Image (cartoon, rainbow, N blue to C red):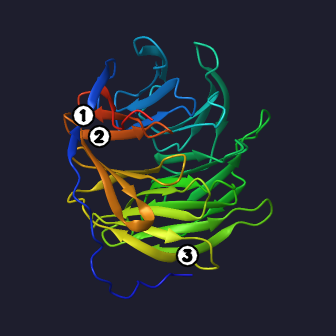
Amino acid sequence: MTVPPPEPEPPMKTTACPSQEAKLVATLTGHTGRVPKLVFSPDRSLLASTADDATACLWAIAGGLPGPRAVLNKGEPLRGLAFAPNSRTLAVGSAAPNGLVWLFDVTDRQPLPVATLRGPRGAVEALAFSADGKLLAGGGEDSVLRVWEVTANTAGNARAILPGHSRPITHLAFAPDGQSIATAAGDGTVRLWTVGRIWSKEKAVLPHPGGATALAFSPDGKWLATAAGDHRLRLWDLTGLTPRLQAELLGHTTLVGLTHFAPDGRTLVSVADGPILYHWEPLSSTRTAIWTVPAAEATGLALTGDARYLAVGTAAGPIGIYRVAAKR
């Protein structure tokens, strides 16, 4: 089902708010190539990164001075990343044509390989675990959404294979209840999928001019925030049978690469090229804070779950970690 574009509405108002400069709290060095993917563990103790130098790195960031913990080298370019909700399992996607996804137990200092998942053709750009950690979704160069069961004795084959996009999938997320997945691609759509044990299917197609560039579910699963090539944020109401466009948030003038809801669901964070970060009160479409990051051009972005710290990957390899919220 394709959701039609909404009727034209007057531009949403934005409230002027002072800009603050993000504080650099750590610089992580070790990669020697562009860093396209970053992810914090849910417990905020680890940061994982992949780079074009064919490595994935784990960084210890909890307490004391952040620094390297382990290097994963598969001998080929690596791309997508996702931590399981318990922060103990890390999924790493290949950027090579083999389309493999590796699972590592990162409980101990030296990560332990535990499973290899198969199916994609080409680079695996996006990965996400369900909230219970039992499912892993992945998408990438072949434009197909796949869902695997994550068990100790997995055979590595996808439980669900869902075509629909006509361009590579760049972002995806599980809904908090684990029964839906949202995917974003350069084909001008965000797609919603119903995920079941026996049957999975496409639920809705949401149009996005210029291609979809980021997405995030609210903690209660009632809202989906998306970004598109027109630099607008869109807030979708998911409580009905069909997703409904609730609001468009205006203000960014560059491409938005990351959206994220704070745990209370009352703050939406968006990060655009600059990097520049906005805090929004979503339902009133009010911009409540602006943070600028004094960094080189960002090639990868990640926020901690509480939205207080932003990791910025660069073309040369160093990763900066910045505080981008007032202390709560």
The front one of 136 and 10 is 10
Dividing the picture into quadrants, the one containing residue 193 is bottom right
Compared with residue 77, is residue 58 higher up or lower down, i.e. above or below? above
Q: Is residue 150 left or right of residue 110?
A: right
Residue occupying image coordinates x 70% and y 60%: 179
Name the one closer to the observer, 85 or 328.
328
Which residue is depicted at the point 36% across and 38% down?
A: 325
Q: CA distance from mark 1 to mark 2?
A: 6 Å
Whether tag 1 and tag 2 are in contact, CB under 8 A, the answer is: yes
The amino acid pointed to by label 3 is: Pro
Residue 279 horizontal/vertical position (percent): 35, 51
Instruction: Give percent across and percent down for residue 141.
Output: 45, 54
Count neighbours of disc 3 (C-alpha within 10 A) and say few if under 14, some if 14 to 19, many if 20 or more.
many
Quickly name the residue at label 1: 315
Looking at numbered disc 2 in the image, what kind of residue is underneath it?
Thr
State the image coordinates of residue 80 (x, y, percent, origin top left). Answer: 48, 41
Q: Could you tell me residue 294's position as x and y percent?
A: 19, 34
> Seen in the image, is 258 located left or right of residue 13?
right
Which numbered tag is attached to residue 243? 3
Quadrant assignment for the C terminus = top left
| Residue pictured at 40% horizontal, 12% vertical | 65
Pointer 2 or 3: first along the chain: 3
Q: Which residue is mark 2?
A: 299
